[in-house]
Image (cartoon, rainbow, N blue to C red):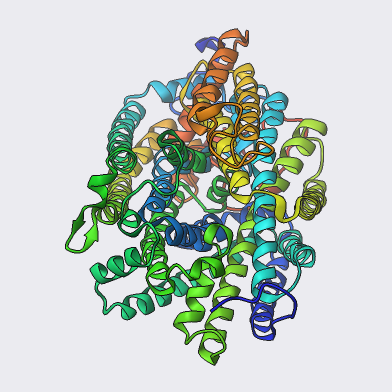
Amino acid sequence: MSDGTAPAGDGAVPAGRDGRVDPAEWRRIERSPEFRELTSRRHRFIAIAAAVTFAEFALYLGLATYATGFMGTLVGGVPIAWLAAMCQVFMTWAVTWLYLRQADRVFTPLEERVAETAGARFMREASTGADATTTERSAR
Amino acid sequence: MTLVLAAGLKALPLSIFGIVLAATLGITYWASKRTSTATEFWAAGRTVTGLQNGWAIAGDYMSASSFLGFAGLVFLFGVDAFVSLMAALVAFVPVMLLLAERMRNSGKYTLADVLAFRLRERPARMAAAVGTLAVVIVYLVAQMVGAGVLIQALTGVSFAPAVVLVGVFMLAYVIFGGMLATTWVQIIKAVILMAAGVLLTVLVLAKVGFSPGELFTRAAANHEAKDGYLHPGLQFPTKLGMLSFGIAFVLGTAGLPHILMRFFTVPNAKAARGSVGWAVFLIGAFYLMVMVVGVGARAILGQAGEEAAGKGGNLAVPTLAESLGGGAGSNGGEIFLAVISAVALATILAVVAGLVISASGAVAHDVWSNVIRRGHDSEGEEVWVAKIAAAAIGALAIVLAIAGGAGFNVSALVGLAFCIAASANFPALLLALFWPRFNTTGAITGIITGVVVSVVLIGLSPPVWPGADSATGSPLGSLGLENPAIFCIPLGFLGCLVGTLLGRERDTERSYHELFVRSETGLGAEEVTGTAVQRRPARQKETAIATQAPPR
């Protein structure tokens, strides 16, 4: 589908015959700087978080598999294997908490910016002020 | 000290079971008044909050194998079994980072919705339904067999009636109360499971004067391997087997249909990710307690407890509870044993209900509504078919569980379910969301490859291969792993890749842009309620934008 089929509207999303949004509109959003910023920042965070999680889990799994002597060493009366397992739990909690915090502080505002620039028809119900614009457009 | 496995019904556990069952039926009645549309049936109207969903995910995920099985493994094998627990917890990180919000943003009721979004609808839905049903039915049979064995041991009700009882209650929740009843059964189960975990942990620690060192010293002294109990290496016959087992859990969870389906019950992506956060917190806390309880069972029950704990150590926790309550025959022991048994029952019921409702989605929403009827059916019809499908799948699971009986190797079945989830469902979902070129052929070949290699390799594995009872019994020799995920997952991805390259489909890349934007931003995501009411006839895609064109 060529981009020419997308009617030039200032942010209005054209609907197809069946009420669907023109595919070109999605391309337009995808190319917008707001969307690119959202995905590049979120994907970078995901890549790092996943790498850290898998690295520490691989380390734990590797030690449990191949360094059984070390894992059985007692530290303060308890085996390192237990301490390492507890570390896994705390690390998993930490990664989860960091992602949730980052999502609330950074990703959600970026998502909202994408939605704003994408046009009122895409606005979520919650966003106030969208109603007026929508009504205005549908009156056209 | 020992649990009587044979004849004689036990009145106390049965009456506490009765209370649990009555409470769940009450919830189901309440939920049935609030469940009529398809969105209400499969997604509880998308009104479950993040916190509630977090508890429900924990309740959906922590099966009896988490509570009794993992603690039993720690009892039997010591620190080696910690690996299983940690793998099962870390598994939620990929779920949170890659799937939770994206599923909510782009799906409706089932994981097939995400695939069908950008692939050819009917074949993609069929393939996803096959993957879903394979995982769910295998996992369901495993849970039912486990439930039968457990209830028989704990209450004296024999195996077949116990399986039927579990099956009937599971179907009652799903058919009458839909996702709302299932959700609340899971939440309540998670709450009482956590409470039981805290209670057991505190009592165990009190026995050793709250000194972890003392706990491990006593546990090691009470194990035949002595200090070997404190070293990994007792549970898995081969190192490769241990690695493979860990990987199966970590990636398999991200392909479990009943877990992923829970993300459709929340109002938006924020609640979806928040619910994984709560689930990770709860499951992590519970697994910390399971480690203490498992080691405590060894320290307190000792080698003599192995007989009572039964095969796989499943009864180690109930036996421990009996001992902590004052020992067999004492009132305290009897009561505590009965309470823990009731917790185990609630655990099983919550998990099997979640499994059945996800299977009903695959049959009714994917196969019936979208493949057979091509979206021309009414919403009422879809819900009716879902209920019939739930009944049929439940009946099938009951029959299979009774026919196979206790002869089914439960851990091999659970391994198979995770292996299929990791090597069939997970690759297809991940590539649909992140790989622009991925196409229908790739999804089909990937899912089929994942299912087939998992079934074949598990079939050839040491625990299943007939007449074999050791690691060398498998025709694959030392490569015959109890859980072959380490081979199956790469093969599943390879299947997706080869199919995609061979396929000649053209427009998947175009629809990818729409899925990508939607999944990343939540634009056009399914709304909280009411979208299902406006079912448009003969539309091409399930996914027409939710904020619809104004009425004209």
Q: Is residue B477 above or below residue B286?
A: above
Residue lying at the far left in this picture: please name it: A76
Of residues B519 and B86, which is closer to you in this image?
A: B86
Asked where in the image residue A55 lies, by quadrant, the reply is top left
- Residue B382 relative to residue B452: left or right: right
Residue lying at 82% horizontally and 32% vertically, measured from the top left? B372
Please determine whether, in this image, residue B436 is positioned above or below residue B287.
above
Image side of residue B106 versus residue B391, left or right: left
The one nearer the camera, B541 or B396, is B396
The picture places residue B259, in percent across and down from the top left corner, at 55, 49
Specify the quadrant that holds the N terminus of chain A.
top right
Q: Could you tell me which residue is drawn at 69 percent across and 35 percent down?
A: B129
Left or right: B298 with respect to B327?
left
Location of the C terminus of chain A by quadrant is: top right
| Visible residue check, residue B153 | yes
| Outermost residue toward the front in this view | B224
Residue B551 visible in the current orientation? no
